[in-house]
Image (spheres, rainbow, N blue to C red):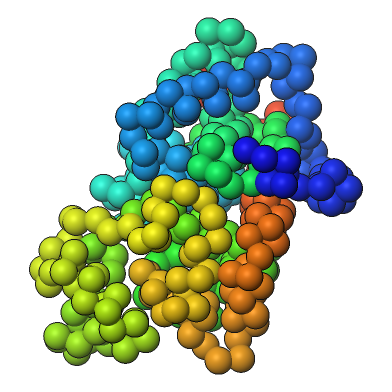
């Protein structure tokens, strides 16, 4: 990770001031109670990623799917437990059989409980792990604000309502982000996380074979040669196969995602829509980030700090789970 990937200190200070004023989170929250929390997390993610090249993208996605459902409270990690009132967000349509990376989060929690028991929340572990994962994949680094506590409930129905879907229009996407005080810049910057990782064929099959309900028809906005590639990898009727979100560098965090959109090679509908609506404010942002990886990295880091502040539990609210998969 080079120095150019780090947010300039002045810019970061401005953002820290704004976020701290709202949520009482601080980058030094565990400096005395668990000073090696990030080091431990980085070591375990680094080791796990050697045997699973997709791990960094999986972990990043966990943090996003946590914060978008009733705030960054670690609820996405909870296993369903009807007796405790926990529905389980893992079973939501957008997460079922696609959300992964839970084991390394469990490993981090286990390691931290040995050295500083009852101190580091699962919600904070997700925030730390997301930053570590992005930086390990070649992306930017930022000071992670900490001090979140864990929620005691989870909601499958809330997850299905809040999380973006492949066919979402730009209007719907903007609405789902604005609910969390995330603006158009945040939408385009955070969507750039699709520069690494994979997507199940089931997410894009209608776009390839049944566009707008017309059997056999595909989305005309897809570049023809790329369409043929996608259709070969995801034949009609195949739901469980996977394709790279970025064909060129699927495991690296870079700005190729935006270049793909410019060339009409966005894999998911809700990605390409950022560049398909003439006159939409998202188009200029896509062009800006495609032109400058540095600008993208800065915007992504700012938006991650902002997203990480969504409806956090602090102080005496919530709890510090002993096991990230269940409430105490």
- In the figure, residue 129 lies in which quadrant? top right
Residue 68: percent from the left, percent from the top?
53, 54
Relative to 185, is 156 above or below? above
Asked if residue 311 can be seen in this view, the reply is: no
Which image quarter: residue 160? bottom left
Residue 83: image x %, image y %?
34, 32
Q: Residue at x 72, y 21 (%)?
A: 30
Relative to the observer, which residue lies in front, 43 or 117?
Answer: 43
x and y percentages locating residue 16 in the rendered image:
82, 45
Q: Position of residue 306 (x, y in %)?
A: 70, 53
Q: Quadrant of the N terminus?
A: top right
The answer to whether residue 154 is left or right of residue 284 is left
Tell me: 286 left or right of 227: right
Q: Residue at x 47, y 22 (%)?
A: 44
Q: Is residue 206 above or below residue 196?
A: below
Q: Is residue 150 left or right of residue 146?
A: left
């Amino acid at each position: 990770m080079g120095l150019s990937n780090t947010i300039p200190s002045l810019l970061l200070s401005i953002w820290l001031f704004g976020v701290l004023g709202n949520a009482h989170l601080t980058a030094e929250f565990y400096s005395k109670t668990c000073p090696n929390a990030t080091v431990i997390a980085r070591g375990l993610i680094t080791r796990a990623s050697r045997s699973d090249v997709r791990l960094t993208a999986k972990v990043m996605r966990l943090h996003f799917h946590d914060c978008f459902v009733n705030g960054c409270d670690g609820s996405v990690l909870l296993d369903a437990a009807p007796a405790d009132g926990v529905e389980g967000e893992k079973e939501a349509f957008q997460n079922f059989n696609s959300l992964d990376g839970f084991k390394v989060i469990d490993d981090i929690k286990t390691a931290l409980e040995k050295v500083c028991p009852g101190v580091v929340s699962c919600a904070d572990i997700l925030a730390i792990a997301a930053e570590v994962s992005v930086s390990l994949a070649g992306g930017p680094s930022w000071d992670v604000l900490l001090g979140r506590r864990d929620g005691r409930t989870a909601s499958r129905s809330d997850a299905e309502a809040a999380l973006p879907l492949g066919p979402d229009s730009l209007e719907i996407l903007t609405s789902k982000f604005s609910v969390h005080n995330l603006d158009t810049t945040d939408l385009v910057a955070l969507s750039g996380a699709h520069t690494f990782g994979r997507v199940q064929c089931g997410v894009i099959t209608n776009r390839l074979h049944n566009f707008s309900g017309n059997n056999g028809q595909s989305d005309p906005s897809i570049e023809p040669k790329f369409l043929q590639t996608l259709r070969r990898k995801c034949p009609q009727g195949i739901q469980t196969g996977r394709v790279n979100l970025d064909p060129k560098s699927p495991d690296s965090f870079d700005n190729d995602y935006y270049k793909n959109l410019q060339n009409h090679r966005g894999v998911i509908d809700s990605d390409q829509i950022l560049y398909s609506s003439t006159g939409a404010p998202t188009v200029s942002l896509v062009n800006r980030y495609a032109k400058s990886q540095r600008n993208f990295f800065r915007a992504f880091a700012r938006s991650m700090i902002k997203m990480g502040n969504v409806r956090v539990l602090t102080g005496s609210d919530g709890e510090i789970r002993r096991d990230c998969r269940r409430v105490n």
